[in-house]
Amino acid sequence: MGYDNREERFSSAYLFRSLGWMLTGGLTVAGLVVGLSAWRMGDHMLSALHNIFNPAQPAPKVDVQSVVIQRVQGVSELTTAVFTMQAVVPTSQEATFNGLVIGTTKLLYIAYGEVRAGVDLHNLTTANVQVADNSIRVQLPPPQVLDRKIDVNRSTVYDYNRGTLGLGPDVAPQLQALAQQEALKKVVEAACADGLLEKANDRAKLVVNQLLTTTGYQNVTVVTQSPSPNACAVEQPTK
């Protein structure tokens, strides 16, 4: 009889311990589930807060016109035609006394002139560039004379004569400056008459067309403009 009581007490104690372990295990699992849920909720909350304070930015846009202009302007002043010419210019100045000419000084100047023409690509604006699908159209600025000069190192005074008695005024520097001015005018006029600006237009069109072809556009159109009426005018020196 006593043996049965001990066995019964042992079974009861084992049952209670088993229930305790089960409860402890259940609480542990429940705690893990709650902790996992809280971690997930916290992660979602952090993600939501990040999206609020760091909203998605729109995709960057490329201003194709500005990119094209920057690339073309990188060429700067596009010199596409050069004209050289030798001009022989005689100049003279008289010396007078009481209204009478008493002597004449003559200077013969041989000048080597050069004229460079092209387009100033810094004048290109977004209004000159139209882009549609795989096509691009660019209108170039009008051609102009970019540089004109007398090569003084190659030019020379061929003859300087103050007359038989040397009564002509000694004005060599003045006559030489006058000869250079007149020679430059003749060279520019000859260059324009030879079609220098038209040649510059054609060459600029070809160069810019080749430049834009490398940008990947399938259809490239380059349009030129006529030179301005005073493109060949020579500025008078300031006195």
Image (cartoon, helix red, strand yellow):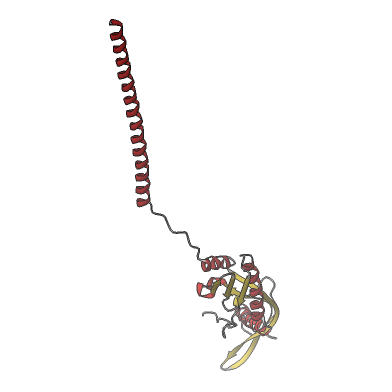
The single residue placed furthest to the top in the displayed view is: 2
For residue 101, above or below residue 31: below
Depth check, front residue: 184 or 117: 117
Q: Quadrant of residue 149?
A: bottom right
Q: Which of 222 and 13 is in front in this view?
A: 13
Is the N terminus in the top left, top right, bottom left or bottom right quadrant?
top left
Q: Quadrant of residue 30?
A: top left
**Position of residue 57 measured from the top left corner of the image (x, y, whole percent):** 42, 56
x%, y% of residue 136? Answer: 58, 72
Q: Is residue 147 visible?
A: no
In this picture, residue 239 sits left or right of residue 222: left
Q: Which of 238 and 222 is in front in this view?
A: 222
Residue at horizontal 58 percent and vertical 74 percent from the top: 137
Q: In this view, does 76 lie above or below 178?
A: above
Quadrant of res 39: top left
Residue 180, visible in the rendered structure: yes
Where residue 126 appears, as percent x and y from the top left, is 51, 72
Residue at the far front in the pictured view: 1
**Vertical placement of residue 44 versus 74, above or below:** above
Q: Position of residue 139 (x, y in %)?
A: 57, 76
- Residue at image coords 34%, 28%: 26
Give me the residue at 54% from left, 68% from top.
69
